Structures are given as C-alpha cells and as structure tokens.
Image: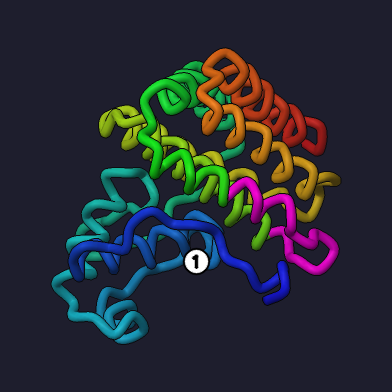
C-alpha cells in the first residue's frame, strides 16, 4: 500500500445512525467540502449518506450547537461562514487547553492507546507529501488532535477541544493554498505523539503548545 493512499487512524466507528450522519456531515463542513454559507437540505443529505431524514436532522441539531451550521425559520439550514476574526479567540482557547490535553494524555493514556499513537506517528513519518493534497494533509492533522483528545481521558476536555479544533481547521482550510509548509506542520505531530506515548508530559505539552502557536502564526503571515 502506498503512503499517499493511507488514511488517518480513527479510534471509534460511529455508534448510531445519528452519529454516522454527524461524523459524515461534520467532516465535510470542517474540510470545507461543504462550502461556507451553503444550504443544507436534510432530504438530499439523507439520500447521499444512505440514511433516513431523522438521523440527519439529529446530526444537524448537534452541528448547530457546535457552530458549524445555522438554522433560520422558514429559510432552512446553512453552513456557517468562516470568519478570520475568530482566529485570535479560537487560538487563545486552544493554546491554553491543547497542552493540557497533551500533558494528560502522556500521564493517563492506557497502553493500548499509547500503542495506537505510536502507530499513528509511524504512519505520519511515511507520508509522501509531494503526492498528497493539502486537504489530505489536514485530515491527518485533525486525526492527530482528535486522537490526543481521546487519549487525555477527559470527555469534557475532549468535547471542548474537538469543537474549537473544528473551527480552527475551517480557518486553516480557507488558506491552505497560501500556506507554504503544510507537510512540515503535519510532520510535527510525530514528535508530539511519541512524547505522549513515552509518558513525557513536559515535552508533550511544550511540543503541543509550539505546534498550535506556530500554525496560528503561519495563518497570520499570509493574511
């Protein structure tokens, strides 16, 4: 199997039809496969996902609470806009909480999760950046962060950081064509994952902090 066809590691498959709809629609919104301000028709989504309208509607309600869609009476549901002015506020939260998640993961993750993180780091090292689209690379970025949140073992922290990482990723995807070193940014995750798997909490927190700050700086550099 070639590296370019490799796919990011996921911990869990969606547990219900509503979860399946949520994950599928969420990822399209986060990666801007569904463009900002696009209308979302629950019947069309249900048909595309081979699901009923009820789980799709449940997913859209959840996504509205996460600020990825917005519903208007008698007008319908739309993907939210991507506002670059949100970068500062989103990054402030991530800079404070992502190192905490990295530290907790390094101290609390059970052996099975540490093994999964090592495997994810190995796979990242084999990626052929030259043959991958920037959106593919961002999928790896998102997978690493979600894996770290899960390994931290705090569901409230995981939910909070997943929400803000989704919002940050939408901003990043808006500027992917103008970012010079997306591949190098993704490579940084291997060091983070190894620090967590090794139980080195201080290093994990430091690498994570520098990673989040560095990507914000890269976005600001192209504005």
Question: Depth check: 191 or 69 in front?
Answer: 191
Q: Looking at the image, is 178 positioned above or below residue 74?
A: above
The part of the chain drawn in magenta is 120-134
Percent x, y for residue 194? 61, 34
Q: Position of residue 68 (x, y in %)?
A: 39, 50
Q: Residue at x 33, y 44 (%)?
A: 66
Q: Is residue 88 visible?
A: yes
The front one of 125 and 39 is 125
Residue 167 on the magenta segment: no
Give the quadrant of the N terminus: bottom right
Q: Is residue 106 left or right of residue 1?
A: left
Q: Nearer the viewer, residue 22 or 154?
A: 154
Q: How was the colour assigned to the protein in this rendering?
A: rainbow
Q: Residue at x 63, y 53 (%)?
A: 138
Q: Position of residue 30 (x, y in %)?
A: 49, 54
Q: Is disc 1 placed on a helix, strand or loop?
A: loop
> Is residue 216 found left or right of 44 in the rendered image?
right
Q: Residue furthest front?
A: 111
Please, is residue 4 above or below residue 100 in the view?
A: below
Left or right? Give the position of 204 relative to 163.
Answer: right
Q: Residue furthest top?
A: 202
- Placement of 83 over or under 9, stated as above or below: above
Q: Which residue is identified by label 1?
A: 34
* Image position, residue 54 (x, y; %): 14, 72
What kind of secondary structure does the magenta stretch mostly adopt? helix
């Amino acid at each position: 199997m070639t590296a370019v066809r490799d796919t990011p590691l996921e911990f869990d498959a969606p547990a219900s039809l509503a979860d399946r709809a949520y994950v599928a629609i969420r990822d399209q919104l986060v990666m801007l496969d569904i463009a900002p301000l696009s209308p979302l028709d629950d019947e069309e989504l249900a048909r595309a996902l081979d699901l009923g309208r009820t789980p799709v509607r449940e997913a859209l309600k959840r996504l509205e609470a996460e600020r990825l869609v917005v519903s208007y009476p008698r007008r319908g549901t739309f993907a939210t806009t991507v506002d670059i002015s949100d970068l500062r506020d989103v990054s402030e939260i991530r800079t404070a909480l992502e190192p905490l998640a990295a530290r907790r993961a390094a101290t609390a993750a059970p052996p099975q999760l540490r093994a999964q993180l090592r495997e994810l780091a190995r796979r990242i090292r084999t990626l052929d950046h030259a043959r991958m689209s920037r959106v593919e690379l961002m999928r790896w970025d998102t997978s690493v962060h979600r894996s770290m949140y899960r390994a931290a073992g705090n569901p409230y922290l995981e939910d909070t950081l997943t929400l803000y990482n989704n919002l940050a990723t939408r901003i990043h995807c808006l500027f992917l064509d103008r970012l010079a070193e997306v591949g190098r940014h993704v490579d940084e995750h291997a060091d983070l994952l190894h620090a967590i798997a090794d139980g080195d909490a201080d290093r994990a927190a430091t690498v994570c902090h520098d990673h989040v700050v560095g990507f914000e700086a890269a976005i600001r550099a192209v504005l």
